[in-house]
Amino acid sequence: MIEASISATVFYLLLVVGTKVSIADLRLIIARPTVMTLVILAHVFLVPIIVSGFILMIPLDAWMATGMILIAASPTGAISNYYVTLARGNAAMSVTLCGVTNTLSFVTAPLSCLLIGELLMIEPIRAVPFGSMLSQTIPTVLLPIVLGIAIRHLYPAWTLRHQQFMERLSFVAIGLLIVAILASRYDLLTPAILGSATVMAILFTILLSTLGWTIARLVAPALNHPHWLAIMFGFPARNLGLTALLAANVFGMIEMATFGVVFFVVQLFMLVPIALLLRVKAQPS
């Protein structure tokens, strides 16, 4: 039952992501193919490699380590668009990056999982067939995004009129998803364990934010402030829905997404102030 509910929730969340991507936004990829390609490759390969190194260097409980792996395998979350908008970054580029990384995640998420599983020699992850992962991600990830883009293209007026309502409903869906994940391991959430997870979530957010900033400055040195903000926030802000989907429907253990919830909540308290600080910096003096 919970697996079907998660699939339905992720389907809706990614449908909303698709409705935010217009044909004009997709032209950004054509306009900057090198930048987009390098950013996507960094998401698919560099993030898993760096996260694997992080896990090897810092002794972690199994539930936190597996949670980090699923976060690393997941694409940019839609909440990155909120951070970018708050910081007065390029919202169109942020939406496009989010849409593209999520669209490709039907194949990149399984690849990233298998890459980390091989690097860390984690048998439960290595043992899951690639085809099994694809059977879960194609209908639940690829289909809703393509459908959302098609709806936006065919019915632009209707989509724009209902966009705010759909976004509010997506926040409700994320809230219900968080409750479902936490309820699966309520016994795990002692103050000491939550404190340890919070510290790890802070360090993990700093790591991915630093990586995002570095990638933005390396691959797009000529881009202005709003553009590289769109790239930077895409690295720490990951897709919690897909993390839950991989945990419950691919690995059969929804509790593997518990750290993803802590990570998501901790980030709100970290990235919102950072976005506001960058917003002030972006204002003309």
Image: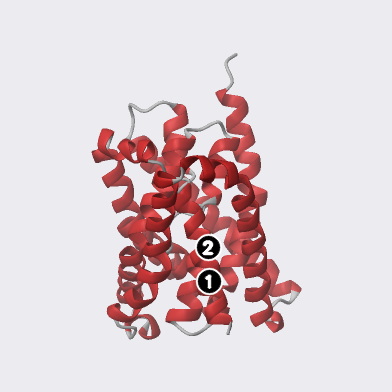
Percent from the top left, x then y, of residue 49?
Answer: 34, 62
Q: Say if mark 2 contacts mark 1, CB within 8 Å.
A: yes
Mark 2 element type: helix
Which of the numbered marks, if any, corresponds to residue 23? Answer: none
Quarter holding residue 161? top right
Taking the view exactly as shown, the residue that stands out farthest to the right is 191
Which of the numbered marks, if any, corresponds to residue 8? Answer: 1
> Which residue is painted at 70% across and 80% down in the image?
186
Mark 1 element type: helix
Residue nearest the observer in this picture, 29 or 161: 161
Q: How is the image coloured?
A: secondary structure
Q: Real-space Cα distance between discs 2 and 1?
A: 6 Å
Q: Residues within 10 Å of mark 2 (few under 14, many from 20)?
A: many
Give the residue type that dot 1 points to: Ala
Give the residue type that dot 2 points to: Tyr
Up the image or down, 246 lies above or below 102; here it is below
Residue nearest the observer in this picture, 160 or 26: 160
**Residue receiving disc 2:** 12
> Which residue is painted at 62% across and 26% down in the image?
280
Percent from the top left, x then y, of residue 100?
Answer: 36, 51
In the picture, the quarter occupied by the C terminus is top right
In the picture, the quarter occupied by the N terminus is bottom right
Q: Residues within 10 Å of mark 1 (few under 14, many from 20)?
A: some
Residue nearest the observer in this picture, 52 or 161: 161
> Which residue is painted at 51% across and 40% down in the image?
157
Residue nearest the observer in this picture, 243 or 123: 243
Q: Is residue 53 visible?
A: no
